[in-house]
Image (cartoon, grey):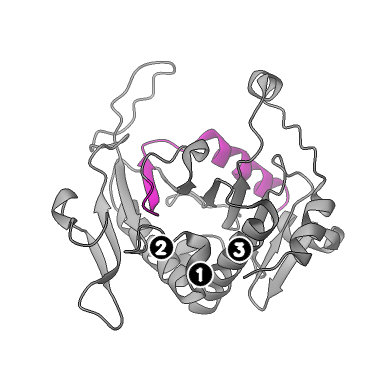
Amino acid sequence: FCPGNEYETLPAVATLPAPHDDGWELRVVPNKFPSFDGTEPLGDTPGDRAPASGSCEVVVFTPDHHRDLADCSPQQATSLLRVIADRCRAHAELPAVAHTSIIVNRGRTSGASLTHPHAQLLSTPFVPPTVRIELDAFAADPGVLATTMDHHPEGIVARRDHAVSLCPPWAGFPFETWIVPSSPTRALTDADADELADVGALLVDLLARLRSLLGEVDYNVTFRVPPPRTDGPFSWHLQVLPRHVPLAGFELSAGVAVNATPAEVAADQLRTAHNR
């Protein structure tokens, strides 16, 4: 993924040129080893096998091999969000795509197989179970995130005009933090420039706070977005999940999270951590 090795990737589908250089700031390339690839729609037979149709892309958001997302500027993080939103729109036009998952894996315990910083888009012919759960939750209470912020202000880490970072009371990982637009916007593709800028700024701010508090910890960032061809309430948001505590047998067996760091304790420590 480093500059000079562009021939080792598939041809880029999107490129952001560097502002003061002849090189690039960001590249989007098809994944050479996609988990989902093809145009055949998913069948209706429960338990049957089906082709892994969809699309997988890699977003190389910095040319610097050693520059973590926490080291990026708020402007770079905002550019990443904007490009991801553009690619989500492109993926939504593919007939086989029912949902696009967006992730950043940092470090071996997060599942990262390459060390150069990058994000991934994995578009699938089905809506993942975690997304269905959130769709049901928003259908039951469209204002659940705003209500949580109002009723649990002790969980708020940082606030900007258009977004908030908070440790929600239902956090399943120690120091799990969500970044939520202040005025619920249904989808990432609906977000305006101010919202993207504040979410991007809070993302790099939070990752820097986590590094100051926990050290060079591995982490996952997941973008929670609704399926493109569905109606109903939703509010897109980010989850930042530090991976310094492994999942144990009970969590894997029962599917029940055991979080030894209460959300209000985590938020308090993150508020006082140095963000740079």
Identify which amino acid the numbered label 3 is placed on. Answer: Ala
Q: Marks 1/3: CA distance?
A: 24 Å
Residue 195 found in image quarter: bottom right
User: Residue 191 bears which disc, if any?
Assistant: 1
Q: Marks 1/2: CA distance?
A: 9 Å
Q: Residues within 10 Å of mark 1 (few under 14, many from 20)?
A: some
Q: Is residue 126 above or below residue 104?
A: above
Q: Is residue 124 left or right of residue 180?
A: left
- Can you say which quadrant of the picture contains the C terminus? bottom right
Q: Earlier in the sequence, mark 1 or mark 2?
A: 2
Task: Name the outermost residue toward the left.
Answer: 7
Residue 123 found in image quarter: top left
Report the residue at 71% width, 72% height from top. 159
Pointer 1 and pointer 2: residues touching (CB < 8 Å)?
Answer: yes
Q: Marks 3/2: CA distance?
A: 24 Å
Identify which amino acid the numbered label 1 is placed on. Answer: Ala
Q: Provide residue 259's location: percent of width, then percent of height.
A: 76, 37
| Residues in magenta, as a range | 115-141
Q: Is residue 246 above or below residue 173?
A: above
Element marked by disc 2: helix
Residue 117 found in image quarter: bottom left
Q: Residues within 10 Å of mark 3 (few under 14, many from 20)?
A: many
Q: Is residue 264 left or right of residue 146?
A: right
Q: Provide residue 94's location: percent of width, then percent of height.
A: 28, 48
The residue indicated by pointer 2 is 85
Q: Is residue 50 magenta?
A: no
Q: Provide residue 236's location: percent of width, then percent of height.
A: 56, 57
Closer to viewer: mark 3 or mark 2: 3
Report the residue at 37% width, 16% height from top. 48
- Can you say which quadrant of the picture contains the N terminus? bottom left
